[in-house]
Amino acid sequence: MPEFQPSLPAMQLEKRRVAMNSIYVALVITTLKLVVGYRTRSLGILSEAAHSGLDFLAALITLLSVRVSDRPADADHPYGHGKFENFSAFLETGLLLVTCIWIVWEAIQRLLYHQTHIEPTAAAFAVMFLSMALDFWRSRRLGKIARKYDSQALEADALHFSTDIWSSGVVILGLALVLIGERMQLPLLATADPVAALLVAGVIVYVSSRLARQTIDALLDAVPSDVRGKITDQVEAVEGVVDVDRVRLRRAGNRYFADVSVGLAHNATFQKSEQVAASVTAAVQAVLPNADVIVHPFPRRAAHENVFDRIRAVAARNNFNVHDVSVQDLGGSLHVEQHLELDEKLLLKDAHDIVTRLEAEIRSGVPEISSILTHIESEPNTIESGDEVLRDAKLEGKLRKVVKEFPDVLDLHEVRIKNVRDLIYLSCHCTMPDDLPLSRVHDVSTALEIRFKQEAPELFKVLIHTEPQTDNTR
């Protein structure tokens, strides 16, 4: 996998440049091997010439593949053109196998049916050593760029040329043995050249088998099993994911595409689902950098889900938000009270119909519920204008007197009074102990709101903001 994400023009330029250099080198090496192979009649050199000739053709295919694979996705190729690199590598495998068949056939003919006189020359040795040096240079260069941009086509070329070094060494050894046989009158060493050719064929078979496996796996969208396991582990660790149902991966060129199906609590909101999907995408890309990730969330009941969770899940499934949910167990029967906000522009009849359908679905999803009572609230979407009353000493005096009735309320401050549509709105801050349970905080706030309205009936709406004691002692 690439260590960084380079700019597309820079990547295209570098990949094409190294592919062109490979073509030039292959052309030079093939020409030199053909000339000395024809003059020396060495099957080893001729097999290497054929090998290099196919390498030249493979380099052309590689150049074409990197040009095509770098094209962006379009309407006909939504996953891009990266598979062309994998296909070109598959073609190179076929070309190598064709070369191998010819070499084996010719070697057997020379060993069993007719011998060919080999004339090892200094030029032959020079060309083969030059070939090894050039193959070493271009295999390192191709390998570096292949790793940098995770290019399978360039990786195939690099693997070719790295094994060419060894096959050229085998040919040199064969020529050397033939030369020794001539000078020391050892006829058996005359067979060293076709034997060397068979060894070259063995190298080609080995390379071809490795390439075949890689390219077939890529074309069939096979991925290493440990990659899928790593992704599953990363995604399961994401907060909010209940379970991972499926992870599907495919590769096109140097890019991975991942489809991940994750289970979320079925009362999760759309916003929560979006947040979890973003975290899942980041988790996948931690394993496969620059992967294109699609996350499919689906509802799933959590292992320890209570009645409240199930009620909210039904409401969330219908894109409603219920609050102040209260459940009472009366003689073994569950009775539910809840508040539901609906569009303030709805007519009462339409709002009531919505509530009736929601209550029926809740009872169906939570059969142990005997009855449901829903308080309908309007969901405001209008900004109201009004005047803020800065101080009302008489009203504040009443409020502070009421606060003394509640030992849990330590302080009353930031009292604000507003006149909106000739209605009086009150907001204030109350300090309570840090260790007070939230359920108790809610009960005290509700009771305090009721007492405020009893002492000051002119109040239309009261909002109490509770704060911990330490928040006011910093």
Image: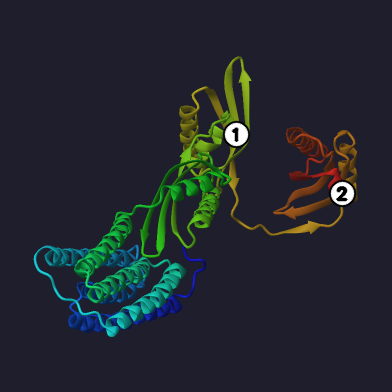
What is the C-alpha distance between the residues marked 2 and 1?
Answer: 33 Å
Q: How many marks?
A: 2
Can residue 86 be seen here?
yes
- Find out whether the residues at labels 2 and 1 contact each other: C-beta distance under 8 Å: no
Q: Residue 354: percent from the left, percent from the top?
A: 48, 39
Q: Residue 48: percent from the left, percent from the top?
A: 25, 73
For label 2, the residue is 472
Residue 73, quarter of the rendered image: bottom left
Residue 56, quarter of the rendered image: bottom left
Residue 385, quarter of the rendered image: bottom right
N-term-proximal mark, 2 vs 1: 1
Q: Residue 84: percent from the left, percent from the top?
A: 29, 67
Who's the residue at 84% across and 57% down the image?
390
- The answer to whether 151 is drawn above or below residue 266 in the figure is below
Mark 2 falls on what kind of element?
helix
Instruction: Say left or right for 288 vs 379.
Output: left
209, 361: nearer the viewer? 209
Q: Amino acid at mark 2?
A: Asn
Callout in the foreground (2, 1): 2
- The answer to whether 24 is drawn above or below residue 65 in the figure is below
388, 334: nearer the viewer? 334
Can residue 296 be seen here?
no
For label 1, the residue is 338
Q: Amino acid at mark 1?
A: Gln
Instruction: Say left or right for 389 vs 258.
Output: right
Q: Residues within 10 Å of mark 1 (few under 14, many from 20)?
A: some
Q: Residue furthest top?
A: 331
Q: Residue 146: percent from the left, percent from the top?
A: 41, 69
Mark 1 falls on what kind of element?
strand
Instruction: Say left or right for 93 vs 432.
Output: left
